[in-house]
Amino acid sequence: MDVDDEASLFELPADAGVAPAAPDDEVQRLGRLLPAAVHLGTSSWSFPGWQRLVYRDACTEAQLARAGLAAYARHPLLRTVGIDRGFYRPLAAAQYAAYARQVPPHFRFLVKAPALITDALLRGERGQPAADNPSFLDAALAAEQFVTPALRGLGPHAGPLVFQLSPLPPRLTADAGRELIDLLGRFLRQLPRSVDGITPIYAVELRNAELLTPRFVRMLHDAGSRLCLAIHPTMPPAARQATALRAMDAGADAGENWRLAGPLVARWSLRAGLRYEEAKRRYAPFDRLLDPDLVTRGTLAHLAHVALRSGQPTFIVVNNKAEGSAPLSCVELARAIVAG
């Protein structure tokens, strides 16, 4: 399938065979009470197991990939979604625009940058390192292949643009990653500040815990970018990352009423102690919360409250592999935020 054919898959009308589930009274109530600045959502929308949670009828994964987004976006609590496709292959502005046409005005997309830019290594078919990546943190290429098409295509529906750094080789994390942090700072400062009148939200997500240092968060602050909290077994718990966010925005000595200096961005990806394939087997078909993580959920709800009092938007994207069912995780997050 070529790019033009692939793009056409996302131009189906909203009634192309996928209808939204009817939300129960509690979900409707939470949708009315959840502040408009809080954008909760999932890392994708193509899961047949979400019948009766998000979708009314039984659908195949292919049907949902092609025509499920419009139904997903009608859920009272799902106000954002991750676009991960571009991580594997850069998308054109027309493909992003096709997504944007399917969602209501309040909806925002969290978009992950291509591995072409964020992986220090070129990899083989099974992900094994093959060679150094000459395009790693190339700002001009990032602007051309990612930032400009994403903002031009999504327009006002653009949410955070996330640069998830793939696990880095030891030579780049030596000496607390000082050279890498300097390189990343130059990269972020060279990215476009505006595209077609849209001001981007840049966020960086780590997979190397040793890089989450005061030097790293100072660099993000100085570059006008955000720390994307990575709730993932390779990283410290959410509360530890929240401490880094607090130091970045308010200083280490800030009081309880500290403020965020920019949007809250978090990706709740994988439960601690599990590998991706293990979690997939355990949680499929992703229609129940099997492993509630009250600590992480409470930390994220607290940070959403901090964002609200700071006048900043919140973007939290949850994976099925976090607790078992991403839509139900969003319901519980909404309940915690509203209760607070």
Image: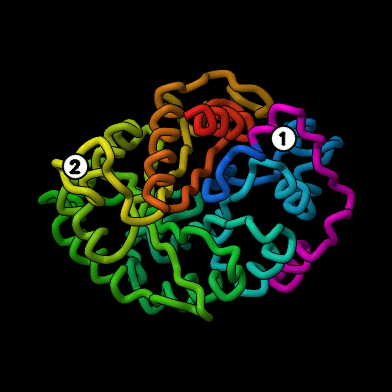
Can you say whether 158 is above or below 334 in the image?
below
Can you say whether 287 is above or below 250 in the image?
above
Determine whether, in the image, residue 261 is placed left or right of residue 278. Answer: left
- Residue holding disc 1: 28
- Secondary element at tag 1: helix
- Secondary element at tag 2: loop
Horizontal and vertical percent position of residue 267: 46, 43
Can you say whether 310 is above or below 202 in the image?
above
Q: Does the magenta stretch include residue 29?
A: yes
Horizontal and vertical percent position of residue 248: 23, 50
Q: In the rendered structure, which amino acid carries the disc numbered 2?
A: Ala
Where are the magenta residues, as a range? 1-30
Q: Residue 254 carries which label?
A: 2
Q: Quadrant of residue 122?
A: bottom left
Q: Can residue 129 be seen in this view?
A: no
Can you say whether 88 is above or below 254 in the image?
below
Q: Can residue 179 be seen in this view?
A: yes
Seen from this angle, which residue lies furthest left?
Answer: 175
**Residue at point 49%, 44% (across, down):** 316
Q: Which of 29 and 292 is in front in this view?
A: 29
If you read the primary sequence from the N terminus, does the residue marked by circle 2 or circle 1 appear first? 1
Q: Is residue 325 magenta?
A: no
Determine whether, in the image, residue 244 is placed left or right of residue 89. Answer: left
Determine whether, in the image, residue 157 is placed left or right of residue 68. Answer: left
